[in-house]
Image: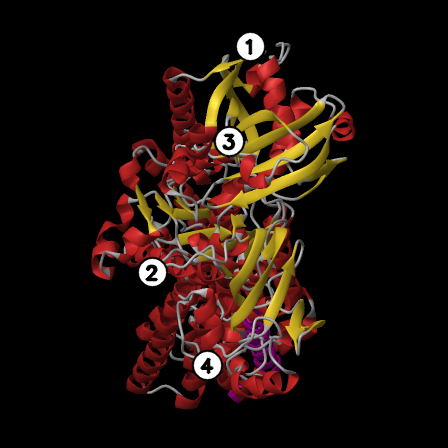
Amino acid sequence: MDKEIKHWFTKSVPETLTLLSVEADTGLSEEEARKRKEHFGANVLERKKKKSLLKIVFSQLNDWLIYVLFAAVIITAFMGEYIDSVIITLVIFLNAAIGTYQEVKAGKAIDALLKMSSPKAVVKRDGQTKEIDSAELVPGDLVILDAGRIIPADLRLLETVNLQIEESSLTGESLPVHKKAESVFENTKMPMAEIENMAFMSTIVTAGRGLGIVVGTGMTTEVGKIADLLDTDSNIKTPLEKKLSELGKSLGKIAVGICIVIFGVSWLQGRDLAEMFLISVSLAVASIPEGLAAIVAVVLSIGVTAMSRKNAIIRKLPAVETLGSVNIICSDKTGTLTMNKMTVTQIFTSEGLMVLEETENTTISESAKLLSEGMILCSDATLENEEATGDPTEIALLVLGDQIGLDRKNLSQKYTRIGENPFDSNRKMMSVLVKSESGCSVFTKGALGSLRIVATQIFDKGEIRAITEEDLQNFSKAAIKMSNNALRTLVLAYKPADENLAPEEMEKDLVLVGLVGMIDPAREEVKPSIRLAAKAGIKTIIITGDHKNTAFAIAKDLEVAESIDQVLTGPELEEISEDEFIEKVNNYRVFARVSPQHKVQIVKALQANGNIVSMTGDGVNDGPSLHIADIGVAMGITGTDVAKNAADMILTDDNFSTIVVAIEQGRNIFQNIKKSVIFLLTCNLGEVLAMFLPLAFGWPAPLIATQLLWINLLTDSLPAIALGMDGDDPDVMQEKPRDAHENFFSHGAGTHVVIGGILIGLITIFAFWYGFYELGYTPFMKSIPEEVVKNARTLAFLVLVCAQLFYSLGLRNGKKPFYHIKIFGNHYLNGAILLGLILQLMLLFVPVLRSAFKLHMPDSKGWLMALLLGLVPLVTLEIYKMIFVKRK
């Protein structure tokens, strides 16, 4: 017994029993099982040592923007502005709490795998059959399998009787796999979907029975390897997180620079250094948008709520923005693009081809009726009141009977099965012997290649005649044509028989009846969604466990691929180097016969080419690729817990088109966040200029520390949040995906910040100068009465606030002038502007507040100036946009 033995599918049954030191009749003894459990450990999926909650919290605080905010806390506390310190501290820890919650929740993917892989198991120990918890299984345990059971560990099969196992969640293969214990393989790189002598943990027995020996438990199983992939991949920052981090670094440097420059200028001018220190640090605080982290969190939360109403649930807030950058959607085929439901679409008999969609009001031929009856009698599936059990292929054959008007209930009463020859992967067919009042018959279904050898006659227009080479060629051509259209073919033959016919005699001298072509059809809404995505500059790539031709046929039908050269298989992928694959990956549109490791490799190669990749899927096998993708999208209805917990987004309706809707929403949300950031930075630039230039001229400070903090923490934040809640832009999907490296200042946004900031700063300085002028003074004078300075500061304060509030209206759309949009269409922004003005008026009209903020009640000219000057930046921006639109 060796824990490191690999490739058990290359060992024969006797060799496997010998290597594991087990007798096939008795199994392990309880004592031996106990020893092996001590050696190998429990059959559970392990977690690597989890980060402590404290470590997770500290990792959330390890960010430049957070450092800058902490600096703001210290500065405001030093200035005695304790309320501001508390507010900024709350923002920091609210942000950290959200990030911590997301990281803890993301770690649940392995727990879902653990839960999924802990069923009960029926084992043979000490010669007795008993049911135990699957966690107690050890290598060498003999496990008994029957229909409906979840495979509790990786097994080398010892015995199989028509055993079929559904492995779609692990391999992506939509059809159950027929297992054969006797098979032995030499190729150690066999695709998992083709290993017919093994059964893998977490897959499900759909038919037949078998006996297997445990060869892999816990983390050594295939599903354990997937868990390990999920657990070891590092978390990757989304573009939004990176941009905010870069912005934080830049703003931190600017803040330090402002402090040094202003303090240096003040020292050279011989000002009161204590006073100027307070003003310089206040201005440094003003240059940092303290509310940015909170505003972004609020905007994302609002966007997430809106998306949930459109059937897209976001698990990680920053992932919303990443959707807007997605330029490739990698989609699993089975259950995502297709319905995961086999359907018969074509029938071929000696009378020709019948396309079922075109058979309405058409008389069904005798050949077609016999074909359908035989397929139903060869089926072990059940279908009652739309509730089905059994092999999807056999369920599809029952549905076919209903489609052409057969009475299945009457058929089951008329015929009784009295014998069978089960499916065998060598024969590739199965036969049943049935008895009715008119006698006994054999019905055989299987692959054309197998049945054409044993068929000597053909059923033709109600009569039986000798089969000809032309008949066989016609059937072959029909089967090839169906296969090229992604249809799986199945042939039926029959013959009259004796009641005592032996199984080995059933499949001789048969009468060929016909063949059916069936497919797992694409969802109706998928093709229009793929076209929509293409118009928005988003490429769809299919990643599947299916065969190359089947995958290509579906991809061609969905307009994803045009040529078979655009399809690459997993084995072909293994033959090329990593560098070569990265170089060529953009040439492929379909990846077939892939393993979970291949999916991760594909996503990483696409990312290495600068793509922002979304991966959709629903199975256990999709977990690692969902985790490593920029956006992992899981199916909410058919998706496993593993897929859902590894994903960034879950589609509650399993609708591919919802992804496109989510991308549109993601683009709009980023636009809204960008509006908020641009607004805050424009305002802060205006404040910096309004303070720096007068101080450089030797004037008194236009604003005091409390006024700066009031504007920065309250008046700025309200419109910023409201801009983040702006409505959707109907033209957002006409644009190409946003470059992931694009910053907040691209596409003219930086120009808006500079022009807007300069205008706001200059009109504030002008208002400050006018405050002296109207009372007969100039700011250059050495001795100026306190009330005159108060008057000048009040006008500067009012103009600055009005200019910022009005300017926010122009930022609702950075390219379209107001007459192309409803300029007052954002009710939240209208309310924010109104509330901002009310708050300013309160400071002036409430005596206690007016005194605290050292303000002076302006006269009528002052009020008029605040209104008119406040409109200048907005009007200038709108004129600029009109010129831009005209040029365009």
Distance CA(mark 1)–CA(mark 2): 48 Å
Image x and y of residue 569, in percent: 33, 48
Crowding around mark 4 (Cα neighbors within 10 Å: few <14, some 14 to 19, many 20+) is: few
Image x and y of residue 536, in percent: 40, 39
Q: Depth check: give the residue in front, 186 or 101.
A: 186
Left or right of 261: which side holds 430?
Answer: right
Q: Depth check: give the residue in front, 560 or 194.
A: 194
Residue 1 is tagged as 4
Distance CA(mark 3)–CA(mark 4): 46 Å
Q: Is residue 676 above or below residue 95?
A: above
Residue 461 is tagged as 1
Q: Is residue 118 above or below residue 637?
A: below
Callout 2 amino acid: Glu
Please say whether residue 174 is one of the residues in the magenta stretch: no
Q: Residue at x 33, y 32 (%)?
A: 886
Which residue is tagged 2? Answer: 186
Q: Secondary structure at mark 3?
A: loop
Which residue is tagged 3? Answer: 508
State which quadrant residue 205 falls in: bottom right
Callout 4 amino acid: Met
Please identify, in this view, whether the residue under mark 1 or under mark 3 is nearer the observer: 3
Question: Magenta stretch?
Answer: 78-107
